Image: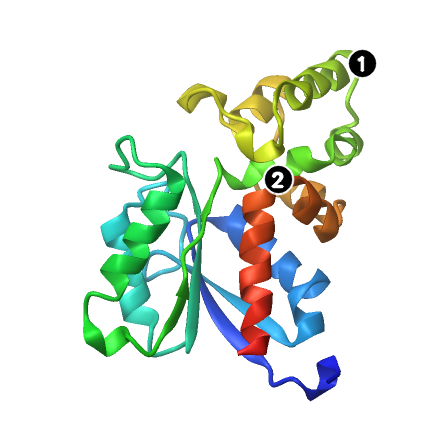
Amino acid sequence: MTTNDLDFINIGVVCEGQTETDFIKQLNKNYFNKINISLKPVGINDKQKNIGGNVSIARIVDFLHKHSNMYPMLTTFIDFYRLKNKGNKKVSELEEEIKNEFYKDNKYRNKILIPYIQMHETEALWFSDINAIIQVKNANKKQKEDLSKIIEKYKNPEDINDSYETAPSKRLENIFCDYSKVIDGKEISNKISINIFIEKCPRFSKWVNEISNLQKK
């Protein structure tokens, strides 16, 4: 069976900001559309505006329920470090909580849901290829060294975070005083192959594979 023989699948993606929306659109263009899958990013408030990280499990589930009639399949793309009231729960536990809360009402049992929380935030993916960051920001020697030190310290980009103040986006803002989360983030991600993200980021890779496998069901 070729790609042309596959039915086109639309999947609603609950995400929280412009950075995530832009990245989802990039995934469509460079990866998912080629296998007849289209991710439809939807903001987590009714006006589809960035809510500034005011995200909780309850709000995510409520939003998924409200949009379940629009899409036969749903997923999420939410940053871990901005998630409210997560306590000491692991990211896998939080994803399981989203799924359990979503399916509590039997009327949603026929829906396919793949909960995904990005570890620790979307900008972690940019560290899959620091050359893209260097090119976009025209980094000087010191800035290149700072970027290299970060990726040398961690096993993979998804591990980059020591505290609230050292999330990947905060690190980029500290290295580049003029770093723009939306503008620079979009340009950086566009310079990195999706295959690099998949190779370097195991949790992200697992999510992409789960979505891709929906074509086999």
Is 131 located above or below residue 78 in the figure? above
What residue sits right under mark 1 in the picture? 141
Q: Quadrant of the N terminus?
A: bottom right
Q: What residue type is labelled 2?
A: Leu
Secondary-structure class at tag 2: helix
Query: Residue sitting at 54 percent across and 30 percent down?
Result: 159
Residue 55 shown left or right of residue 22 in the figure: left
Residue 140 shown left or right of residue 177 in the figure: right
Q: How far across and how far down the image is residue 101, in percent?
A: 23, 58
Few, some or many residues within 10 Å of mark 1 (<14, 14–19, 20+): few
What residue sits right under mark 2 in the picture? 125
Few, some or many residues within 10 Å of mark 2 (<14, 14–19, 20+): many
Query: Is residue 62 among what the camera can see?
Result: no
Q: How far across and how far down the image is residue 120, in percent?
A: 48, 35
Query: Is residue 168 among what the camera can see?
Result: yes
Is 75 located above or below residue 121 in the figure? below
Mark 1 and mark 2: span between their CA atoms?
A: 22 Å
Q: Quadrant of residue 183?
A: top right
Secondary-structure class at tag 1: helix
Closer-to-camera residue (109/55): 109
Is 178 located above or below residue 124 in the figure? above
Residue 96 shown left or right of residue 76 in the figure: left
Query: Residue sitting at 38 percent across and 77 percent down?
Result: 70
